[in-house]
Image (tube, rainbow, N blue to C red):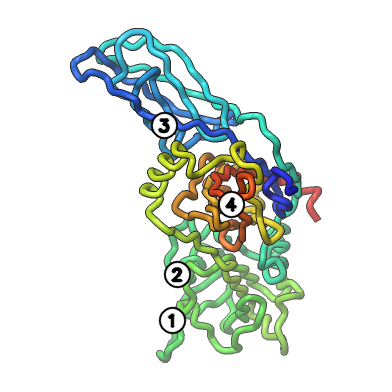
Amino acid sequence: MRSCLFLPRVSVGATVRVAGVLTVAMALGAVDAQAPSGVVRGVVRDGQGTPVANAEVQWTPSGTVVRSKDDGSYLLSGVPEGAVTIRVRRVGYLPQEREFTVADQGWVTADWRLERAPQQMAVLNVNARKDPSDGRLAGYRARLEAQRGGHFITRERIEQSGNRSLLDAFRGIPGVRIGTPERGGNAGKLVRFRSSTCQPLVFIDGFAATAADFDFESIDLNMVEGIELYLSSNSVPPALIGSRGLEQCGVVAVWSRPVQLRVPRAKGTDERRAELVKELAAGTVLTAEQVDLTAAVANGELEVLYPEPLWRTGVSGQATVEFVVDARGRLDWGTLAVVSATNEAFGRAIMEALVPVRWDAAAKGRTPVAQLVVLTIEFTRPPSESIR
């Protein structure tokens, strides 16, 4: 019999936790519009202080349910005057209740820290960054880490600067001159280093481009992962030395971004998730605790890429996502959502990792069923001195 831990193997600098408990709150009534009432507002966070999205907040026993937003905030209006009990619930977390006193037309602030529900978990720590383009970008990243002899323009710097072209990214680097061809021609603006009158050697993804002046304006900056500039031949690393001494006037190395996987959207997420609440209440979608055999990765592993800027800067954290695997073993992309994330890049990395994954459906007895999966990954970046 297959283990209840639905992920047999995970390749990531991460701890994976499979959550399970679900409670679905239904609105059973409403406050009389004429009765004195107030408002309760606040933020729902997890035990680490990360905002929790889509948590159910309700005054009991019969208040209307509201759900926390992506930033964990909520606003519960129409709460009756006087002592009232507020309940907060979320898949995979222990529910909480607290009593508050609400004044007519008054505001009460109620923030929450939800602790994860105890459950069986698949736990795996792999402190390494894996990337499908490691072979191509390994040299660039090693030189970026060392910061010796060159100027580096990273993806993070490109996004922060708002530059629109490759030449814009060059501006402001000491010793770089940008001009135009003296006799016209089709080439873009010329790039020269320091007092040199000849063109630098250009590499694209590790291959020398051309001995002639390179048209830098032909490169889409959105497709660039990083750029290296070496203004003199004595600073050029061995991997970027050209034939016939072409690096004498300096070197520009441009590295393209890894392939970005796109997360499909089968339906509008808000529409589909509204349907999901009804399906959970009706029992047409089950949770991990309600099935005999949990949904499992069919093709052996889930490879989550540690976001490169966060890896390089030593940022650790975690993210939780949820989604439904239907009775045919297909991921319902309309239900995929980030529950919480210490950095949005962590949540995005998990969602992208799910794109190529195939699933075995959950089962109740011998019958395949749809299951809500809650997946938490902790990204743990070891100290830089231990990475080699």
Q: CA distance from mark 3 to mark 2?
A: 38 Å
- Depicted 258 relative to depicted 28: above or below: below
Amino acid type, mark 3: Ser
Residue tagged 1:
180
Residue tagged 2:
165
Residue tagged 3:
73
Q: CA distance from mark 3 to mark 4?
A: 37 Å
Residue occupying image coordinates x 67% and y 66%: 132
Amino acid type, mark 1: Thr
- Depicted 104 relative to depicted 42: above or below: above
Q: Are marks 3 and 4 in contact (CB under 8 Å)?
A: no
Q: Nearer the viewer, mark 3 or mark 1?
A: 3
Q: Nearer the viewer, mark 3 or mark 2?
A: 3
Q: Quadrant of the C terminus?
A: bottom right
Q: Nearer the viewer, mark 3 or mark 4?
A: 4
Q: CA distance from mark 1 to mark 2?
A: 15 Å
Residue 31 left/right relative to 352: left
- Percent across and percent down for residue 273 are 42, 45
Return the disc, 3 or 1, that comes first in the chain's sequence.
3
- Percent across and percent down for residue 367 are 59, 50
Q: Nearer the viewer, residue 353 or 7?
A: 7
Return the disc, 3 or 4, that comes first in the chain's sequence.
3
Under circle 2, the secondary element is: loop
Under circle 3, the secondary element is: strand
Q: CA distance from mark 2 to mark 4?
A: 52 Å
Amino acid type, mark 4: Pro
Under circle 4, the secondary element is: strand
Determine which of the numbered discs, if any, sits on residue 368 in the image: 4
Q: Nearer the viewer, mark 2 or mark 4?
A: 4
Q: Quadrant of residue 65?
A: top left
Return the disc, 1 or 4, that comes first in the chain's sequence.
1
